[in-house]
Image (spheres, helix red, strand yellow):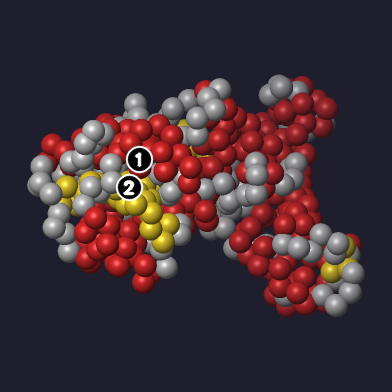
Amino acid sequence: MNSILIVDDLESIHEMLDAVVQPIGLTTAFAKDGQSALELFKKEQFQLVLTDINMEPMDGIELLKELKSIDPNVLVIMMSGYANTDNAMQSLRLGAFDFITKPFKVDQLMHAINRAQDIFKSRIRDGDTADGDPSSNFVGDSENIQKLRKNIEKLSSTTNTILIEGEIGTQKSLVAALLHKSSLAEEESEAEKPFVTVSCKKLTVDEIQEQLIGNEKNGGPLFAEAKGGTLFVRDVEFLTDEFQSDLGNIISEFKEDVRVVCSTCRNLEAMTEAGEFDESLYFRISTSPVKVPSLRDRADDIPLIARAILNCTGFEDLDVSDRAKALLAAYQWPGNYTELKHAIEEAANQCDGETLRAKDLPEKIHDMASWPSLTDFMENKSREYMSRVLQACKGDASKAAEILKCEENEFATLDS
């Protein structure tokens, strides 16, 4: 975000706002009424608009509607010289990002602008997490990834609240983006719908109250911003106890307008049973779970993922030796994809030839103590193969047992 469109019929407001935002590196464009602002927006597509409500012939409320119809993701801060609760509520329902009353304090305005910048940055960082189609980022064809893709496809036709579960670094944000994109494809709509991200881990209690829950506990600006699209609530396990039941109620209230996707790296079921997480919220968000496999559970994909990382980071001409591939596949990757990406980038920068070799990899990957035992490795491979045969037999355990010459009850352990 590098520019702001300011809409107000008072030139003094233009001059004052220009002086406020220029020191933080933002440029400004001005319009004196809603119609001229709309024409300017169509030409330049600003990410942030500050507009007065009381203008003629097109007022700020009508301008907000028009802006949202052109770009549902635009962030609009409404300004008014009247402390009118009805105007404020109507603005937020229509998707305004914030509402401030004139005359306002500079720190109040800057707080709103800074929050808008943070959301814009999070969209770039967490939105699609890919260049082009985000589905290209889930590299590999292991059985666990195939299951994940099918689950995403199945859920694309529903409006259920979804809980994405997975360890740290397993690309849960990518799964959320894929769910959002697949839902749009299912609707066969060309209009881009908003994909809004918030992290309960990164926000303070006051920010969660203000942005997510709302001061009246009826949904903050993030719900209004995500109207018609997806609100991705990351790290939901970090939501404080006082807000958990509130969030469940708000999700229920907005279920017709906003699809909520939550993510966690904790076992929320166990936390709920232990009284550490609100039961009503857990059952509200867990009806459609999506489990993202760790790299340990898709080790066969790791060399392919490493290749994709090299291609995306400017090292597409660098080969990978068989020994390096074996080490990458055998390492346990407690940080999953995030750790793998850092390791590959570090190794590529260390490499002094045309082939990335084992010696280029970080020392921890050479530590044999992290490798699984032969028994564990063979057990995991056996379970993978059994699952593939069972799938080929369309779930017929009796037929699969006959093919593998094993007991039928051994297939009961595959889901454990």
Q: Nearer the viewer, residue 19 or 69?
A: 19
User: How many callouts does the rendering have?
Assistant: 2
- Tell me the number on the disc at residue 15: none
Q: Where does the image place residue 290, in percent across and percent down from the top left?
A: 53, 39
Dots 1, 2 in contact, CB < 8 A: yes
Q: Secondary structure at mark 1?
A: helix
**Residue 169, quarter of the rendered image:** bottom right
Quadrant in which the N terminus is drawn:
bottom left
Determine which of the numbered discs, if any, sits on residue 36 in the image: 1
Judge left or right: residue 122 versus residue 335. Answer: left
Compute the Cα span from label 1 to label 2: 6 Å
Q: Which mark is residue 31?
A: 2
Compared with 359, 2 (above or below) is: above
User: For this rendering, which residue is in front, 308 or 293?
Assistant: 308
Indicate the amino acid at tag 1. Answer: Ser
Q: x and y percent of residue 289 in the render?
A: 49, 37
